[in-house]
Image: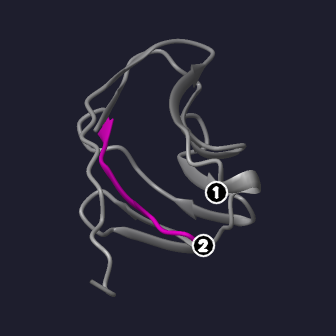
Amino acid sequence: VAEIETAKEIGLGIGSAELVYDTVQKKLRFKDQEAPLDEIDGKIELRILIDRTSVEIYANGGRVYMPVHHIPQDKDYRLSLFTRGGSAHFETEVGELKSIWN
């Protein structure tokens, strides 16, 4: 969950790629995908599933679903949160997906 304060953009870095929410244009972007997304009470909620070859993004309880083919460079799965042009408050929870092969 991200509570928008004064930030123009907020985002999540996934290796060298960036998932960005533009608070001015009300758009969510990742790589070549873009979708309109309105805040709910000044917040957005994201559920992001990262696999070896894809990133699946669910926003605001499924109002937006964005599946994107993504293979990180050099298997770089580092995650980072950021803001641009102001501040925001993030509440995060990170877990690991279990393999379907085991």
Residue farthest toward the bottom in the current orientation of the protein: 101
Q: Seen in the image, is 16 located left or right of residue 85?
A: right
Span colored in magenta: 43-53
Residue at screen point 55% across, 69% down: 52
Q: Is residue 30 depicted above or below 53 in this figure?
A: above
Can you give x and y, in whole percent of width and height, for residue 5 in the image?
39, 17
Residue type, label 1: Phe
Q: Residues within 10 Å of mark 1 (few under 14, many from 20)?
A: many
Location of mark 2 (residue): 68
Residues at marks 2 and 1 touching, judged by CB atoms closer than 8 Å:
yes
Q: Is residue 67 depicted above or below 28 in this figure?
A: below
Q: Is residue 74 magenta?
A: no
Residue farthest toward the front in the current orientation of the protein: 102
Quarter holding the N terminus is top left
Residue type, label 2: Val
Q: Main secondary structure of the magenta part?
A: strand
Residue at screen point 52% across, 20% down: 7
Whole-number angstrom distance, CA of label 2 to CA of label 1: 8 Å
Can you give x and y, in whole percent of width and height, for residue 66 in the image?
50, 71
Location of mark 1 (residue): 30
Can you give x and y, in whole percent of width and height, for residue 84 in the image?
62, 20
Figure quadrant of residue 70: bottom right
Q: Seen in the image, is 41 located left or right of residue 64?
A: left
Q: Seen in the image, is 47 located left or right of residue 23?
A: left
Residue at screen point 47% across, 15% down: 6
Q: Nearer the viewer, residue 95 or 55?
A: 95
Q: Which mark is residue 71?
A: none
Can you give x and y, in whole percent of width and height, for residue 80 in the image?
52, 31
